[in-house]
Amino acid sequence: GDSVTQMEGPVTLSEEAFLTINCTYTATGYPSLFWYVQYPGEGLQLLLKATKADDKGSNKGFEATYRKETTSFHLEKGSVQVSDSAVYFCALSDNNTDKLIFGTGTRLQVFP
Amino acid sequence: EAGVTQFPSHSVIEKGQTVTLRCDPISGHDNLYWYRRVMGKEIKFLLHFVKESKQDESGMPNNRFLAERTGGTYSTLKVQPAELEDSGVYFCASSQPGTYTDTQYFGPGTRLTVL
């Protein structure tokens, strides 16, 4: 079945460092891809999404490009802030049922 | 516009007891989903309502779990009797019907601890 694999954390960075969180997927058909973020004490928030190959989703300085040839959707940010500390989840949508299939989450810790 | 709300935020119960979780979706959203995250693992789909009908309940772990959405508004998820392995965070999400790229908006979750 469909699945999502993302890098294990925690990822620990200093402020202003470059961030990459890897995400790869296995799916039949052409799913939409998402990154969700969970800040401490809060619920899941949609960070960005891409609905077809070569689409780039972006928000709050984060970017991810839907790469069909490598089945990847890596999350990047050029300069992280302490406020970006959170758990990041990569997900895909099952086009037949609309349910989301998540990766295990990657905790990001940014220190000043 | 109010977001998805869930109640309670935390629940601690003993094995064998019953717990009912509630989710209020965004007003007007016909789609309602339940997910859960157990022991820091991936967030897993439980079921999907379209209005008051169960569209997909393939993720429900067993018959100790009962979800309802009477009237197509709020939903409840009852666990009876609760077991230790049911501990985790239960998330609810809602979306507008339309294309397959509907964005799902999540609530803050209910943290369930079964002792």
Image: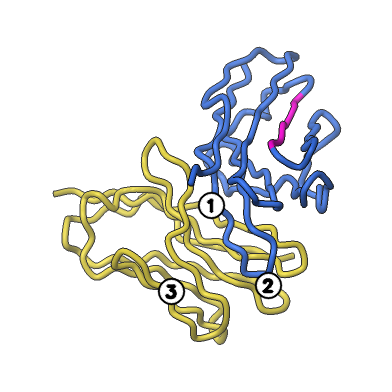
> Alpha-carbon distance for marks 2 and 3?
19 Å
Q: Is residue A67 left or right of residue B19?
A: left
Identified by mark 2, the residue type is Ala
- What mark, if any, has residue A104 been given in the picture? 1
Q: Residue at x 73, y 13 (%)?
A: B17
Q: Are marks 2 and 3 on the same chain?
A: yes
Residue A68 is situated, as x and y percent measured from the top left of the image, at: 57, 83
Identified by mark 3, the residue type is Gly
Q: Is residue A74 left or right of residue A28?
A: left
Residue on which disc 2 sits: A27
Residue A67 is situated, as x and y percent measured from the top left of the image, at: 51, 82
Q: Residue at x 81, y 32 (%)?
A: B66
Q: Are marks 1 and 2 on the same chain?
A: yes
Identified by mark 1, the residue type is Thr
Find out whether residue A51 is within the magenta segment.
no
> Alpha-carbon distance for marks 1 and 3?
21 Å
Mark 3 Cα within 10 Å, few/some/many (few <14, many 20+)? many
Residue on which disc 3 sits: A57
Residue B69 is situated, as x and y percent measured from the top left of the image, at: 77, 37
- Identify by letter the chain in yellow: A
- Identify by letter the chain in blue: B
